[in-house]
Amino acid sequence: MKWKRLYNALTHPSDLIAYLILRTRWAERMSDERFLRMIYYIKFHKPLNLRNPQTFNEKLQWLKLNDRKPEYTLMVDKYKVKGYVANIIGDKYIIPTLGVWNRPEDIDWDKLPNQFVLKTNHDGGNYGVVVCKDKIAFDKKKAIKRLHASLGRNVYKFGREWPYKNVERIVFAEQYLEDDSSNELPDYKFFCFDGEIKALFIATERQSGDVKFDYFDADFNHLDIVQHHPMSDRTIPKPDNFEEMKEIASKLSKGIPHVRVDLYDVNGKVYFGEMTFFHHGGMFPFHPSHWDKDFGDWIKLPIK
C-alpha cells in the first residue's frame, strides 16, 4: 500500500504539492477561506468561485464556510450518529456496537467475538478501520498502532471540513459483516440533495487493495464517471432492496442541501454506514468534467 501511495503521489503532482503544503505550520495558520482557495487552485488549476459557485466541488467549499449547523458534528461522528439515525429510521438498520473505549490500549479483547471490526469515530475512508476475521491470528499490536495513527489524524486540518473539528475521538467495535454472495462488503453511497436522490456510487474490491468506484443514476443506470478510483471491469447487479435504500437515504437527508448517505447491503439486509457532507473533500475533479457542473446544479445553496 505504501508503494502504491508513493506511485500515486509521483504520478499526480498536484496531489503531491497539496500533500506537502498541508503539513506545514504556514498552512495551519491560514483562515479556512484562504486555505480552501489555495488548495482548490492547486487541484483544479483555476480560482475558487465563492461569490457565485456553479460546480459541485465549488459548492462544497461554499458549504464548508457558510452552512455550519451544530448538529452536523454529531452526524459525522460514526458512533454517536447511530442514535440519531435510529430515531429516524429505526434500530434494525444499525450495525450492533460491541464496545467503546477512549484509547486502543483499553480494548477488552476477551469480550470481543472471533470476528469484529474496530473503528475510530472521526476518521475518513478506511484510515480508522481494522478488520478482524480470526481473533487467534489477529495482530493486536499492529491494530493498536493503526488506531493510534488514526486518532492522531486531524480531518479538519487537511480539508477544513469543520464538522470534524469538535468530534471527541474514541475507538469502538462493531459486528463483522460480510455478504455471502460476494465475500466482501459492498457499500452504496447515495448523493442526496434535501431528500432527493440523484446518483450513487458503489465501492467494491476493497479487500484487494485496489478499490473500484462505479457510479449510477437514481434508476441504477451506469454512468461514465471516473473520480479518484477506476471503474470495475465486472457488471454490478442492482440490489433487490435498492428502493428501500433510496427511501432510507431520502429520510436521512431531508433538510440538508447536500449529504452523502452510505449504506451496506448484507445478505438482503440494509445497514447504515455513515453520513458524509463533503465527498472527497470537494477536491477531486470529475471525468468527464461536465459532471462537476451537473452535480453542482443539484445543490440549492441556502441563503446566508
Image (cartoon, rainbow, N blue to C red):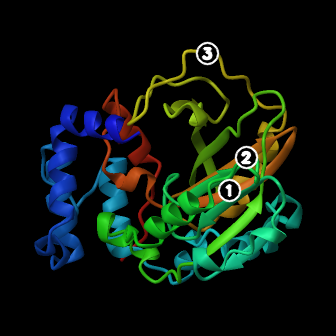
| Residue ID at (58%, 42%) | 198
- Residue 273 badge: 1
Q: CA distance from mark 1 to mark 2?
A: 6 Å
Determine the secondary structure under disc 1. Answer: strand
- N-terminal label among 1 and 3: 3
Q: Is residue 264 left or right of residue 59?
A: right
Q: Position of residue 149 (x, y in %)?
A: 43, 66
The amino acid marked with disc number 3 is Arg
Residue in front for this viewpoint, 20 or 221: 20
Q: Please report contact status of discs 1 and 3: CB closer than 8 Å, yes or no.
A: no
Q: Position of residue 96 (x, y in %)?
A: 82, 64
Kindly indicate the quadrant of the structure image that contains residue 40: bottom left
Determine the secondary structure under disc 3. Answer: loop
Identify the residue under disc 3. 234
Q: Position of residue 116 (x, y in %)?
A: 76, 56
| Residue ID at (35%, 74%) | 66
Identify the residue under disc 2. 264
